[in-house]
């Protein structure tokens, strides 16, 4: 009887706690302003990105166009940022005076005026090194830095990764549509009938991606001002390290306020989602809507000299990387019917790497000619064939 009563109690407790929750928070029809970026006091560029908050069921990013963005000093100096891409406001170099404070002014196209607090220029020590090690799981990358002057206590890092990759198969041929009595057929011919060579512009490409997580560190509780932290991880077999990989790491010194702001943001975005996680906390930055003090703004402006360093990792340095492509190729059997079928299915002619065709195949039979999907032949469908200026 006690077990029955306990079961009923459990059903009542857990069966009645599921109710639809309607948030009392009201979002602006156009979203609140989001300000991302750091004012670079050194020789490099400053990029400020302006966006708008979105509804919970929305996936499309909304960028703030046509704004006027100015870096203003306490001595009334002003630097205008230019919108060189949608929502991205840029200036190539500032070289700010480290003895005075600066703030960011934003006039949006809807007539609102936003302003950050005045903040000092902070000195960022150089990055000691970015190191890596390989284990059975993949390649782990670490950032190493220190500040002998002991002036920087709070740090942030981000990175851009770039990798070279090659098309698994090459193609000497191209399709030629032929109108016949029975309808459209497809034949193929050499892409270069004179040299009988393949298209070299679609076999070597590059991709890049930016860091997504918030990477921060502090030496406040440490006995010396040195930091060694995990930065990135590439799993074994990834295409990123199939040929040549590069990582550009950037280091920022932070104010204590910006560090605490990023701590809360990291907790809100990376450590919530279950009943056991801490609840999201309110983000209070140092940017305000002067036109309407009740209008929230998301963002925190700091000013520092951005330090960076680049490393390369060659696949030859990685034993047993075991990159395997998912691409497949099949051999032609019948010249016209197979090509027509392959074209209709999105397949394109290739040549087997170990047995390339250097001359016309025998009449009526394509010899050792194969076909595969276009993505396995043309790498420009997933990347660019323009070699980066820094590539070695």
Image (cartoon, helix red, strand yellow):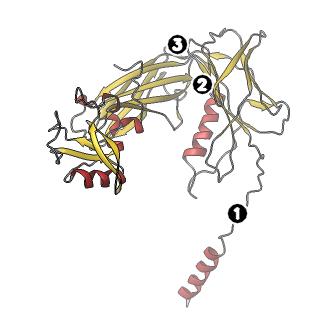
Residue where numbered disc 1 is placed:
21
- Quarter of the view holding residue 244: top left
Q: Secondary structure at mark 3?
A: loop
Number of marks in the rendered image: 3
Disc on the earlier residue, 1 or 2? 1
Residue 309 locus on image (x, y percent): 44, 19
Mark 3 neighbour density, 10 Å: few (under 14) some (14–19) many (20 or more): few
Image-based side of 161 in relation to 201, left or right: right
Disc on the earlier residue, 2 or 3? 3
The one nearer the camera, 148 or 236, is 236
The answer to whether the residue labelled 1 contacts the one labelled 2, judged by CB atoms less than 8 Å apart, is no
Image-based side of 340 in relation to 37, left or right: left
- Gap between marks 1 and 2 measured at Cα: 38 Å
- Gap between marks 2 and 3 measured at Cα: 15 Å
Dividing the image into 4 quarters, which one contains the C terminus? top left
Relative to 329, does residue 209 appear above or below in the rendering? above
Relative to 274, does residue 205 appear above or below in the rendering? above
The one nearer the camera, 184 or 249, is 184
Residue where numbered disc 3 is placed:
149
Residue 252 locus on image (x, y percent): 55, 23
Is residue 382 visible in the rendered structure shown here?
no
Q: Secondary structure at mark 2?
A: loop
Residue 319 locus on image (x, y percent): 21, 35
Residue 251 locus on image (x, y percent): 51, 23
Which of discs 1 and 2 lies nearer the camera? The answer is 1
Residue beneath the point at 82% across and 31% down: 112
Disc on the earlier residue, 1 or 3? 1
The one nearer the camera, 356 or 294, is 356
Residue where numbered disc 2 is placed:
254
Dividing the image into 4 quarters, which one contains the N terminus? bottom right
Q: Secondary structure at mark 1?
A: loop
């Amino acid at each position: 009887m006690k077990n029955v009563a306990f079961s009923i109690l459990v059903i009542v407790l857990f069966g009645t706690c599921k109710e639809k929750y309607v948030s009392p928070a009201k979002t602006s029809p156009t979203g609140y302003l989001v300000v991302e970026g750091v004012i670079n006091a050194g020789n490099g560029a400053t990029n400020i990105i302006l966006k708008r908050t979105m509804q919970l069921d929305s996936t499309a990013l909304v960028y703030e166009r046509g704004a006027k963005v100015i870096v203003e000093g306490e001595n009334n100096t002003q630097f205008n940022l230019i919108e060189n891409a949608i929502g991205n406001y840029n200036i190539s170099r500032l070289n700010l005076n480290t003895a005075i404070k600066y703030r960011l002014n934003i006039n949006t196209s809807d007539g609102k005026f936003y302003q950050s607090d005045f903040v000092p220029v902070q000195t960022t020590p150089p990055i000691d090194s970015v190191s890596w090690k390989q284990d059975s799981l993949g390649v782990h990358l670490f950032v190493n830095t220190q500040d002998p002057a002991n002036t920087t206590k709070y740090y942030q890092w981000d990175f851009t990764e770039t990798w070279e990759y090659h098309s698994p198969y090459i193609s000497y041929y191209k399709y030629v549509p032929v109108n016949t009595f029975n309808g459209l057929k497809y034949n193929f011919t050499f892409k270069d009938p004179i040299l009988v060579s393949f298209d070299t512009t679609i076999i070597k490409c590059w991709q890049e991606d930016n860091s997504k997580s918030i990477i921060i560190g502090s030496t406040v509780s440490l006995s010396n001002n040195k930091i060694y932290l995990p930065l990135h991880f590439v799993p074994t077999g990834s295409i990123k390290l199939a040929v040549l990989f590069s990582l550009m790491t950037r280091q920022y010194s932070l104010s204590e306020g910006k560090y605490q702001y990023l701590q809360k943001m990291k907790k809100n975005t990376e450590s919530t989602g279950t009943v056991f996680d801490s609840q999201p906390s309110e983000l209070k930055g140092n940017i305000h809507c002067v036109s309407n003090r009740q209008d929230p703004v998301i963002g925190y402006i700091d000013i520092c000299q951005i330090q960076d360093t680049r490393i390369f990792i060659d696949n030859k340095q990685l034993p047993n990387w075991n990159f395997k492509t998912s691409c497949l190729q099949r051999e032609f059997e019948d010249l016209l019917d197979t090509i027509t079928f392959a074209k209709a299915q999105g397949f394109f002619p290739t040549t087997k790497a170990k047995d390339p065709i250097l001359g016309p195949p025998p009449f009526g039979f394509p010899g050792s000619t194969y076909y595969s999907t276009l993505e396995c032949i043309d790498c420009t469908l997933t990347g660019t064939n323009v070699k980066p200026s820094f590539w070695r």
